[in-house]
Amino acid sequence: MGQENAKDHTQRLFIAIPVPEPISKKLENWTLVHKERLSFRKWTHPRDYHITLQFLGDTTAAQRDALQAALRDVKAKPLTLVLNGAGTFGPAKSPRVLWAAIAGHLEGLNNLHVEVIKATRTVGFVPEDRPYSPHITLARGFAGGTEMSNESTASAPSSLEWKADRFVLMRTHMHAAPMYEIIGEYPLAEH
């Protein structure tokens, strides 16, 4: 019973840069037009679009409180980010993820990622063991049919710029739509 009780009090968390509504709307409009040609099982709700900085996983209330304190100490400047087309992770015959590419101040984005990792390490979180690849997930789980070609994503939005002025701590609500809830916000400010 104690283990079940502890599990009930954990939250599945991650740290991200939210995507502003005008950019989300452009991505949503593009996905609506291309859904029939891009056969994926699960499409991301437009209010769930984000750029992950670090996935944390199941987190206790005590860890969450310490995490929020550590994240308040992260210092970084606002970032100018730009949509830069789309791509996929996985083989062309069955890609796992359809994503929107990010351009712009990538050095600053990578530095923010590193600062977030440093802050979360102080609370006991371990970063994923793979290179950081910033993107916005649009869909998951290719449903089959024809192989995806480069032409499938050629019309994806690009050159749309925005200023990222904050990062957020997000909670996942599995099987909900939208499924992510912001539970903490941390401003990016000029020093």
Image (spheres, rainbow, N blue to C red):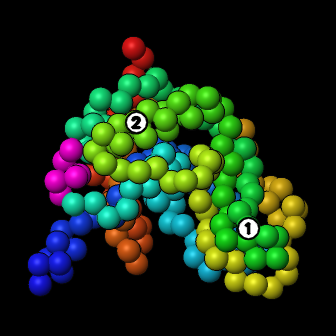
Residue 176: image quadrant is bottom left
Image quarter where the N terminus lies is bottom left
Marks 2 and 1, how far apart in space?
Answer: 29 Å
Using a 10 Å C-alpha cutoff, classify the residue at mark 1 as few (fewer than 14 neighbours), some (14 to 19) or many (20 or more): few
The disc placed on residue 90 is: 1
Tag in front: 2 or 1: 2
Image quarter where the C terminus lies is top left
Q: Position of residue 98 (x, y in %)?
A: 68, 64
Which range is magenta?
A: 61-66
Mark 2 residue type: Lys
Q: Residue at 76% of width from left, 84% of height from top? A: 144
The disc placed on residue 158 is: none
Residue 153: image quadrant is bottom right
Q: Residue furthest left?
A: 2
Q: Earlier in the sequence, mark 2 or mark 1?
A: 1
Q: Position of residue 133 (x, y in %)?
A: 63, 48
Q: Nearer the viewer, residue 16 or 158?
A: 16
- Determine if residue 29 is in view: no
Q: Is residue 62 magenta?
A: yes
Up/down of 17 relative to 76, above or below: below
Q: Residue at 61% of width from left, 71% of height from top? A: 140
Q: Nearer the viewer, residue 1 or 24?
A: 1
Residue 97: image quadrant is bottom right
Residue located beneath label 2 in the image: 118
Q: Residue at 36% of width from left, 42% of height from top? A: 121
Q: Position of residue 119 (x, y in %)?
A: 35, 37
Q: Position of residue 108 (x, y in %)?
A: 56, 28
Q: Residue at 35% of width from left, 58% of height from top? A: 13
Mark 1 residue type: Gly
- Determine if residue 89 is in view: yes
Element carrying mark 2 = helix
